[in-house]
Structures are given as structure tokens and as C-alpha cells.
């Protein structure tokens, strides 16, 4: 296969993924029928409110789901191999080497009782067993220098609590990039960091990816980061993907009312009286989802539309935007939405409902 043909094959394919947890009354489906693809060299963002299933989805990719939670259906294909079918010994060869993750809270991910350099050394030696102690130390210092840690040898000898939040996140990025993974997963990598440090961490991630040629899945609720860093976006709500699109299409032509609401909340779409926009209500509990569209109870577009409350919409392709819809050279990529009335009009109804 030629390199050009190989580059068109998705690096990762998540197909109809379902994740269940053990509940008092039986299994509870937390993630339901999630599908998306990640291609080489791209940044794919998963966005949505807390509890939408973003982190569970990527933990399933890494085979790091917590006890009592399991993949109950679907496939996760990485370079054509179904990770859900691989034995643990094969997953260990992939995890940390070809697939790597930057976790949400570096203070929890780092062992407070071990020096930072020792923890990085463990990550290095896990997939490079032939290195001696000196070579391992040199690799650790090189990784820390690559993510902008000053005096890497000196800082490697300190403990996580002696590092700032931004510097701890740099250490986590260095650990994740130790073996130049093909796919890097970043789960809320800038949570609890101030705006300046957020920008620095994202710059470090971009530089590390560029050196290794890695693709990235970015998990975030920060749509500003998505606009700056992502190529494509999937919006999740109540365990399902409700919209996928190229990043510019999503911001300029959101098709699902939930996406419209998220953007209006962040971008300052005003309502009557100058109030900031908020999506009414809250997401349903996983064990208490409605029979139809899970977003229907919060969606003004669903008023007087019986279909929304009785039939769950499928994620379906939408018409391609006209060429040049958002300026010269705008790539009109495929987009899809899970809404019976997907499109600009359905989305605007949500805003009008609160503006009234």
C-alpha cells in the first residue's frame, strides 16, 4: 500500500461503542452507540457537558475503564486491530507506546511519593528495556527539556508537589510523548490552569505532536480551545454523539440545537434583558433517559413535535455547505447531526425560546 493510500485510512475507528455500568436494577448504559474516526496528524475534539460520556469513551480506548464499567458492544479499531478483542499482554505493548494519554489532573496522575524523574524513567523503560541507567536519565532530561521545563536535571530530582500546576502538566505531556505515540489523548489538559498557562500547555502539546507526527483526541468543555486547536469536532450529549463537523462548520453552521446552545453560552449570545444565554434544565441521568431524544426536555425546537419525545434520532449526514460559505478556501467537509429537525432553523428555535 502506498503512503498516500495508507494516510487515508483512519488511524482510529470507534464503531457503535456502548459502555455499561453495574446498577442496582441491572446494567446502566453510560455511552450508547458512539462512532467516530481519527485520521493521522489531525486533532479531533470531543466536547459536551460533564457527564456526557467523553472521558469514558477515551478510557475505553485505553482499556482503563474503572471497575464495574465495561464495553458492552461495538469495536475500537486502532490501525485495523480491534482493541476490545486483544488480550491484556498485547494491549500493554500498545498502551503508552502507540497510544498515550495526558490525564485531567496531573497531581492525581503523578505519584506524590516518587520524584518526577523516576516516574518518567519508568515510562521510558517500559517500552525501551535496553537502555541503561545513564541513557534513561538522558532520555528523561531530554523529554523535560522538549516540553520547556528549565533545568531538567535539577527538576527531575524534585517531587510533584514542588512543581506548579502548569509544570506538572508539562511532565505528564513528556511522559505521554516518551515513545512518540501515533495517537495522543488529552483529557481536559488545561483544567484549573489560568489563561496564560493554558496557552503555554497547548503550545507544548502542539510542538510535541509536531515532532512525533501524532494525531490527538482533545477532550474539553472549552470551546475556545477547540476553535484554536481542533480540525474536527464531535459533540456528545447524554452518552451519544449528537453532531460531528469540521471545526469551522461547527462554529459557523451548528446543526443541532444542543450545539447552538453550547456556542451561545460561550460566545455571549444575549437574551431579552441582556441576560447571558443558558440551556434550560440539565441532562438526564443515564438510568432515566427519555424514550425519544434525550435533549428534547431542554429543547425549544421540540415543542409540539411528538416525534422528538417518542423516537430517538439517528446521527445522519447533512447536506454539504456551499463552497466558500465561510470565506475563500473553506473546506466543506462532511457533517452529521442526530436531530429530527437538524439545521440552522431548528437551532435558532432554541435561542428564540429563551429570548422570548
Image (cartoon, grey):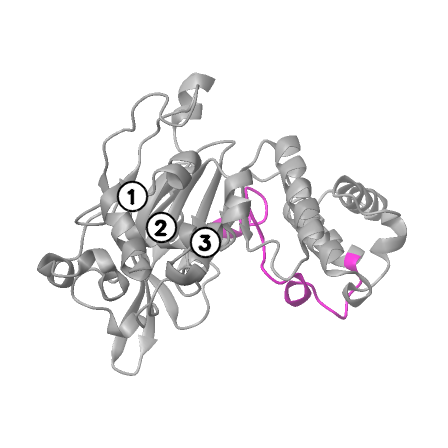
Task: Find numbered disc 3 in the image and state the secondary structure of the residue it sits on.
Answer: helix
From the image, state whether disc 2 or disc 3 is nearer to you: 2
* Numbered circle sitting on residue 105: none
Pick whichever, 247 or 86, lies toward us: 247
* Numbered circle sitting on residue 259: 2
Neighbourhood count class around disc 2 (C-alpha, 10 Å): few under 14, some 14–19, many 20 upward: many
Check disc 1 and report the residue beneath it: 255
Name the residue at 38% across, 58% down.
Answer: 271
- Please state if 238 lies on the left or on the right of 42 as rendered: left
**Residue 67, image quadrant:** bottom left
Quadrant assignment for the C terminus: bottom left
Name the residue at 44% across, 49% down.
Answer: 46
Name the residue at 38% across, 46% down.
Answer: 234
Q: Is residue 86 visible?
A: no
The residue lying furthest to the bottom in this view is 24
Task: Tell me where residue 289 appears, x and y as whole percent.
Answer: 24, 69
CA–CA distance in space, label 2 to label 3 = 21 Å
Q: Earlier in the sequence, mark 2 or mark 3?
A: 3
Q: Which residues are magenta?
A: 90-116
Q: Is residue 241 above or below residue 81?
A: below
Q: Is residue 213 visible?
A: yes
Name the residue at 23% across, 36% down.
Answer: 318
- Please state if 182 lies on the left or on the right of 308 as rendered: right
Task: Tell me where residue 255 appears, x and y as whole percent.
Answer: 29, 43
The residue lying furthest to the front in this view is 273
* Numbered circle sitting on residue 58: 3
CA–CA distance in space, label 3 to label 1 = 25 Å
CA–CA distance in space, label 1 to label 2 = 7 Å
Task: Tell me where residue 355 appears, x and y as whole percent.
Answer: 32, 58
Task: Tell me where residue 197 appears, x and y as whole percent.
Answer: 71, 51
Task: Confirm or deny contact between disc 3 and disc 1 (CB under 8 A).
Answer: no
Task: Confirm or deny contact between disc 1 and disc 2 (CB under 8 A).
Answer: yes
Amino acid at each position: 500500500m502506498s503512503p498516500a493510500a495508507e494516510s487515508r485510512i483512519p488511524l482510529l475507528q470507534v464503531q457503535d461503542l456502548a459502555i455499561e455500568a453495574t446498577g442496582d436494577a441491572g446494567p446502566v448504559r453510560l455511552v450508547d452507540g458512539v462512532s467516530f474516526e481519527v485520521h493521522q496528524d489531525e486533532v479531533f475534539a470531543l466536547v459536551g457537558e460533564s457527564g456526557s460520556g467523553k472521558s469514558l469513551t477515551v478510557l475505553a480506548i485505553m482499556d482503563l475503564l474503572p471497575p464495574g464499567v465495561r464495553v458492552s458492544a461495538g469495536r475500537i479499531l486502532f490501525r485495523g486491530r480491534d482493541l476490545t478483542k486483544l488480550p491484556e499482554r498485547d494491549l500493554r505493548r500498545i498502551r503508552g507506546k502507540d497510544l498515550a494519554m495526558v490525564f485531567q489532573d496531573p497531581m492525581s496522575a503523578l505519584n506524590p511519593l516518587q520524584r518526577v524523574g523516576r516516574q518518567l524513567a519508568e515510562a521510558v523503560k517500559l517500552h525501551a528495556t535496553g537502555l541503561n541507567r545513564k541513557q534513561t536519565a538522558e532520555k528523561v532530561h531530554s523529554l523535560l527539556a522538549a516540553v520547556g521545563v528549565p533545568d531538567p536535571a535539577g527538576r527531575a530530582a524534585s517531587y510533584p508537589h514542588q512543581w506548579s500546576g502548569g509544570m506538572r502538566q508539562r511532565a505528564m505531556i513528556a511522559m505521554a510523548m516518551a515513545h512518540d505515540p501515533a495517537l495522543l489523548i488529552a483529557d481536559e489538559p488545561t483544567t484549573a490552569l489560568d489563561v496564560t498557562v493554558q496557552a503555554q500547555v497547548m503550545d507544548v502539546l502542539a510542538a510535541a505532536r509536531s515532532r512525533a507526527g501524532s494525531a490527538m483526541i482533545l477532550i474539553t468543555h472549552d470551546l475556545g480551545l477547540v476553535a484554536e486547536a481542533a480540525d474536527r469536532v464531535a459533540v456528545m450529549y447524554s452518552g451519544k454523539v449528537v453532531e460531528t463537523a469540521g471545526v469551522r462548520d461547527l462554529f459557523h453552521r451548528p446543526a443541532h440545537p444542543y450545539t447552538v446552545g453550547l456556542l451561545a453560552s460561550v460566545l455571549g449570545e444575549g437574551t431579552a434583558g441582556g441576560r447571558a444565554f443558558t440551556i434550560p434544565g440539565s441532562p438526564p441521568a443515564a438510568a432515566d433517559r427519555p424514550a425519544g431524544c434525550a435533549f428534547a426536555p431542554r429543547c425549544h425546537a421540540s415543542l409540539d413535535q411528538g416525534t422528538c419525545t417518542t423516537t430517538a434520532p439517528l446521527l445522519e449526514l447533512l447536506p454539504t455547505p456551499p463552497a466558500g460559505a465561510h470565506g475563500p478556501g473553506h473546506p466543506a467537509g462532511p457533517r452529521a447531526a442526530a436531530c429530527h429537525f437538524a439545521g440552522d432553523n431548528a437551532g435558532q428555535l432554541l435561542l428564540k425560546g429563551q429570548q422570548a
